[in-house]
Image (cartoon, grey):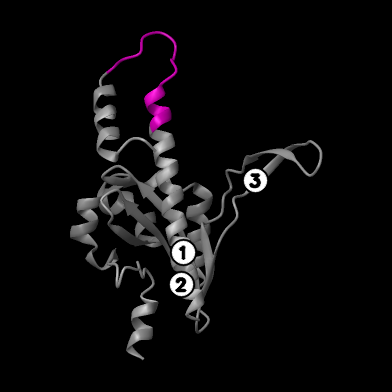
Amino acid sequence: MGISVEEYKELLKKQDGKVNRGKAVHDPMRQLQGKVNREYGKIFEENVDMICKIYEKNGLAKIEKTPESMRILKYIDNGKFEAVFDKTAQPDFKGVIKGGRSVVFDAKFTTADKIVYRALTDHQREALLEYSKLGAISFILVGFANGKIYKIDINEWINMKQDFGRHYITQTELDDLNPKGIVIPKKGVVDFLNLLESKGKK
């Protein structure tokens, strides 16, 4: 991408405190921030998808990436069309673990030192909560720029304001308050469902 996370954060610090007078102006730093976050998020999702394929190869689970929900605006020709992403997006991954238990989760990545409540859309939160009520393993897998990954149960996410007094959780708080939620790589693989470990014990 041509810019490190550290360089990017320094650019954001320099941008902080600048006040725009009059009409709203084009903010290239905001665009850069969005682009960097999207790229890291895409890589994180691809890595999670790869782990799901490892589960499948070992006969432990069948978990698939949910296609992006799109709304077609205009048909062109030769099978082409113009479309926009639908705001009613589903959770990123759905599947079933060997034995029959359903698993549904969303993968989020942040270059900040916290994960915000609004990282999930209202529709995603409601969907994850509904799956949880029906007995599915339902959570958010959060990746940070320092390489740490956390698994946060949807019910903990929903109670964020009540438990933390605000609509975000810092990485430090996740380290201190939810040590069981930290996903530790085993043999180079982020076994976030602990399926590979259980297989090795059999």
Q: Which residue is mark 2?
A: 54
Give the magenta range: 18-32
Total number of numbered labels?
A: 3
Front: mark 1 or 3: 1
Q: Quadrant of residue 18?
A: top left
Q: Which residue is mark 3?
A: 70
Which type of secondary structure does the marked residue at label 2 adopt?
helix
- Disc 1 marks a residue whose amino acid type is Met
The dot on residue 50 is 1
C-beta proximity under 8 Å, tags 1 and 2: yes
In the rendered image, residue 47, in percent from the top left (x then y), is placed at 43, 59
Front: mark 3 or 2: 2
- Disc 3 marks a residue whose amino acid type is Met
3 left or right of 125?
left
Q: Quadrant of residue 182?
A: bottom left
Tell me which residue sits at (29%, 22%) in the image: 15
